[in-house]
Image: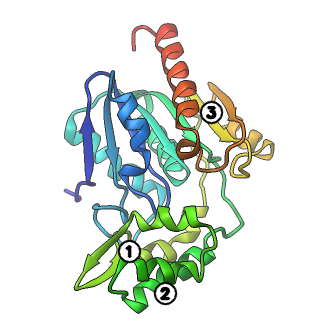
Amino acid sequence: MSALLNYKLQGKGPTVVLLHGLFGSLDNLGLLARDLSVDHQVLSLDLRNHGLSFHSHQHDYQLMAQDVKTVLDHLGLPQVTLIGHSMGGKVAIQLASLLGNRVETLVVLDMAPVAYTESRHDRVFAGLEAVSQQKPSSRAAAMETLSKHIELEGVRQFLGKSMTRQDNAITWRFNVEALKANYANILGWQPVALISAPTLFIKGSDSDYLTEAHQKAVQCQFNDVKAHVIANTGHWLHAEKPNDVLRVTRRFLSQRRVSHPSN
């Protein structure tokens, strides 16, 4: 049996699965988890090569979806709602294709089911590798090293959440080497067979991860799909405007339950 992903369960009710993005961890969607756990059972996971989950030289969407399915089977969860951000959004889509009618609803946060051609993380990888090579003795020194490669303070603070201490040096919880080696897989995408689960794409208005150019790809892979734009926010919409994301998500989930009461 393959190793289980690190996960956290909270709350009671219909199960919602939360899937984080690249360089993240299960804590990244914590604001959503805390709210949804009031009336749902929320399963948050560290994807492979992230957080406290296992490291592997292999990293692609088929494997990541199977990792999550293994946890769902282990916990005996027959029906789930999937919510994924960025890379986690693609994992959620792949998982929905794998699980079929076990998925009640699917919410994808600012990600398109397409292969991206633009490398967006060169500076990030340069900063991560610099920290790994220099083995700084303090978090402050590690953040200073990051600042030489990554201009945005918010990005540095986000990455800093995955710092840990090992052998008296600051290092990363995620597997930098494997993520860089498999970056083409992370950008890439193999279209899935038509997904019937009701699906909502939520886009940050200022983000270019999900655009009108991706509409055809979405329509080819989903037969019950809606989209919503959160104004004045970017790719990290769930962190920038969590209340807006929650309101839209909850409305979508409640509408689907009303229209499909047998679920």
Label 1 environment density (alpha carbons within 10 Å; few <14, some 14–19, many ≥20): few
Which circle's residue, 2 or 3, is located before the other in the chain? 2
Q: Nearer the viewer, mark 2 or mark 3?
A: 2
Could you tell me how far apart the alpha carbons at marks 2 and 1 are, in whole angstroms? 20 Å
Q: Nearer the viewer, residue 89 or 160?
A: 160
Which circle's residue, 2 or 1, is located before the other in the chain? 1
Quarter-of-image position of residue 244 = top right
Tell me the kind of residue under disc 3. Phe
Label 2 environment density (alpha carbons within 10 Å; few <14, some 14–19, many ≥20): some
Q: In the picture, which quadrant includes the C terminus?
A: top left
Identify the residue position indicated by label 1 in the image.
Answer: 57
Image coordinates for residue 168, horizontal then vertical, percent: 24, 85
Identify the residue position indicated by label 2 in the image.
Answer: 130
Give the left or right position of residue 150, taking residue 79 as reference. Answer: right
Image coordinates for residue 162, horizontal then vertical, percent: 38, 66
Mark 2 secondary-structure assignment: helix
Q: In the picture, which quadrant includes the N terminus?
A: bottom left
- Verify CB contact (< 8 Å) between mark 2 and mark 1: no
Mark 1 secondary-structure assignment: loop
Q: Nearer the viewer, residue 230 or 65?
A: 230
Mark number displayed over residue 222: 3
Q: Nearer the viewer, mark 2 or mark 1?
A: 2
Give the left or right position of residue 247, taking residue 7 as reference. Answer: right
